[in-house]
Image (cartoon, rainbow, N blue to C red):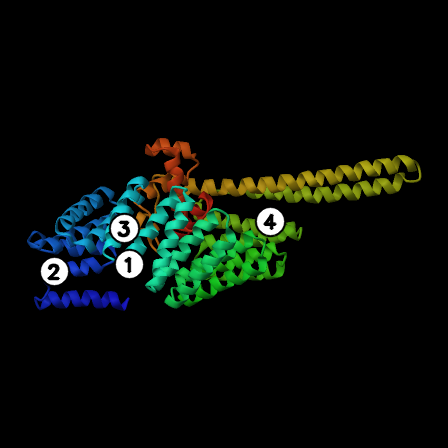
Amino acid sequence: MRPICFFFFSIFALFLFGQVSDVDLLDSAYAENNPKKTLDILLSIESPKDFTDSLQSKYLLTKGIAYGKRGIEDSALFYLNRSIEISESQSFNYLITRAGNAKGLTLFHAGRYENAIQTYQEALMVAEENDFREEESTILGNMGGVYFQMDDYTAAIKYSQKSLDIAIEINDIDDIAYGNLRLAVVYEEIDSLELSILHNSKASKSAEKLKNYVLLTYIEKTLGNIHKKLDRLDSSLYHHKRARYFAELEGEQENIASTTIEIARVHLENGQFEMAESEALNNLAISNANSYPLQAKLAHDVLYQIALKRNDYKKALRERNEYLIINDSLNAVDTKERIAELEIKYETAKKEKEIIEANTEIERKERFQQFLYIIIATVVVFSTIGLLLLIQRFRLKKALLFQEINTLRVQINSIFGGETQKLDLTLDQINEGLFKPLSEREYEILNEAISDKTNSEIADTVFVSVNTVKTHLKNIYLKLGVSNRKEALEALLAKV
């Protein structure tokens, strides 16, 4: 907060004393990461046409990058192409590589992967000829990202590894962290989980040097999930606890809550019901204190599953009721019918018990009269009861799964008024806190994806191919840190 305040104070002071030149403003805009602030500063430049060619190219580059970050692709490409034209005519090689990289990113976010690769290759050639090692690393890493989206995992690994090698050579800790993370993502996608663990661990070490606790929380949580896939529950628990530790260092209560619920889930899968219950209650306390209804809902879900494992239907019903009450607060939808469904299942379980007791009594009374018949009848009765119990359990699990899916759909219809185009969250709100922001195209795809529409229906709506929709969804899930539409919805609901 202080550097931002100092920046604006400096700008104000310079204006006050009449010492701010157009060049100073351009340098400030060039160094600014926030695209809106960048464009505001550029608008304050009085005579950009009076700039020299190099400053004119830098001005156009800065403007193009800002529009690209905001997802306004046409404007971004217009200004970046003009910057490249001026730079090439005057051999401003560094600006050529910067503009080329920015143009490649813009084409990448627009889903124009082949064009992005060609642009990156042209910029990479200039960077290599002029020994711009840092730019080489950045461009190669971005090329790896494009090939990943194209499902060319061999090329993705090749270019990501080249990028990482350069980052190690020049000792760029930030690029080392993200280079390893990029490789970890690719290896996880192709189920080379051991290699994914290796690169995630290396990324974690670099992030620790940078004291980037947000990145560390993400990496450690990812490691926890991978070890869970491999059924290494002790290792999974270790990494999820580390994720919570870094979340606590960052002071992000919502991340603390989310990592705590992951710890509870590992304990649950490990059959450690008391520990799972303790962590779920811990999550619930944090969630209630900070008004995180989605996290509270997840806590009640874990407590509900624990109750089912213990065959404690009364507690299961109570936790499910709490879960549904929170859903009501989120989506204002009447869920009495679903509560009644669970109550019926509870009553059915009671009746099953009464049937067993009744049959036992009948068996006792008839034993002396028809001994052989009773033995046969007992076998039939208990076999029938066992079958009924198995069928009942199957139906309960099936109904509960349907209920969870239906709850999410009702929640979608309530929050978005049944129209996925009317997403309450703006693109800027969604991008807040993401390592890589969503583009406007991805934002449009995301709107369609959280509805019941199939990929084919989404493709028809936004006038692209089904493969392009799949590619956009993979990119969206990667940026949001989720694996599917349900998790994407939950991530969005957490921001509402």
Q: As drawn, is 151 to the left or to the right of 72?
A: right
Report the amino acid beneath label 1.
Arg
Q: Nearer the viewer, mark 3 or mark 2?
A: 3
* Disc number placed over residue 23 in the picture, else none: 2
Quarter of the picture containing the N terminus is bottom left
The residues tagged by marks 3 and 2 sit, at their Cα atoms, a distance apart of: 28 Å
Residues packed near mark 4 inside 10 Å, few (<14), some (14 to 19) or many (20 plus): some
Rounded to the nearest angstrom, the CA distance separating label 1 from label 3 is 10 Å
Tell me which label, 4 or 1, sits earlier in the chain.
1
Q: CA distance from mark 4 to mark 1?
A: 61 Å
Q: CA distance from mark 1 to mark 2?
A: 27 Å
* Residue shown at the point (58%, 40%) measured from the top left: 399
Dots 4, 1 in contact, CB < 8 A: no
Nearest to N terminus: mark 1 or mark 2: 2
Q: Secondary structure at mark 4?
A: helix
Residue 134, quarter of the rendered image = bottom left
Residue indicated by mark 1 = 133
Type of residue at label 4?
A: Leu
Q: Which image quadrant is residue 269 in?
A: bottom right
Q: Percent position (x, y) of residue 267?
A: 59, 58
As drawn, the label of residue 124 is 3
